[in-house]
Each structure stands twice: as structure tokens, then as C-alpha cells.
Amino acid sequence: MSDDKTLIVKRTATGLGLFTTEPIKRGARILEYKGEIISTDEANRRANKYLFELDEKRTIDGSSRDNLARYFNHACRPNAKGYSIKNKIWIYAERNIKAGEQITINYGTAYFDQHIRPKGCKCAKCVEKQAV
């Protein structure tokens, strides 16, 4: 498992992103997505960009700057994924991640369609496609 000392926030093309200073092996638990657990109705009212669905009825509001996991950026071909485990969201490596690499997750279709698609996706896969 990674710890906060091996993760750093750096500027990216889309704002701030989370990077690892040490390699992370596939399947390793990276970080918990922390925040207030709220109802889905309350999440819809808040409508901020740091909401992570825990289940059909509950969502984690990770907008606090104490939540280092809020800096995971979207990628259409991510290297990590969030899993709901016992009232928590844990982010795990989906493949080996190299030291210095940005850690990314897929934000999902609803978020993508509402927030990313209108401005155009800037993840590495999509930027590559645009350059061709």
C-alpha cells in the first residue's frame, strides 16, 4: 500500500494531479477517498466535482483539501480504480505504475458526459488521438 509520503500533487494540463514518487505494483491499494458520507439526494443538491458514489443511496463528498485522493484525474485508459469496501472507497492500481507517473481513474460515463465531454477530454489517450 502507498502512503501519503509517496504521493505528490503537481500541476497538469487539467489542473492539479496526483503522482507517485515510487513504483506501485498492480493490485496494490493506493489511497482512501475520504470525505463526508451524504445521501444521493444531498449529493445532487451539492453538485460539486468531488463526489464519489459509495452505493445507490450514499455518496462521499471528497471536496475537503484534506482528501489527497481528490487529486486523481480522469483518464479514458486509467491506471487505477476505486472500489467501495465497507463504507469506504479505496483506490487500487489496475496495472504497474512507474515512479513519477500520474495516477488516474475513470470518472464514469455520467461525470464524463456532464463535465468532460463538453470541453473535450485532455487525458493522454484523447490528446494522442487529437494529435494524429
Image (tube, rainbow, N blue to C red):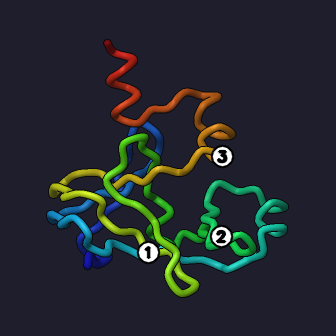
Q: Are marks 1 and 3 in contact (CB under 8 Å)?
A: no
Q: CA distance from mark 1 to mark 3?
A: 20 Å
- From the top left corner, tell me how far across and down residue 34 is, in percent: 53, 77
Residue 118 quadrant: top right
Residue 61 badge: 2
* Above or below, comparing residue 124 to residue 27 in the picture: above
Q: Residue furthest front?
A: 56
Q: Quadrant of the N terminus?
A: bottom left
Q: Amino acid at mark 3?
A: Ala
Residue 90 badge: 1
Q: Is residue 76 left or right of residue 124?
A: right
Q: Earlier in the sequence, mark 1 or mark 2?
A: 2
Q: Is residue 108 left or right of residue 28?
A: right
In front of the other: 53 or 35? 53
Q: Amino acid at mark 1?
A: Trp
In front of the other: label 1 or label 2? 1
Q: Residue at x 77, y 68 (%)?
A: 40
Q: Residues within 10 Å of mark 3 (few under 14, many from 20)?
A: few
Q: CA distance from mark 1 to mark 2?
A: 14 Å
In front of the other: 89 or 5? 89
Residue 110 badge: 3
Q: Amino acid at mark 2?
A: Asp
Q: Earlier in the sequence, mark 3 or mark 2?
A: 2
In front of the other: 50 or 25? 25
Q: CA distance from mark 3 to mark 2?
A: 17 Å
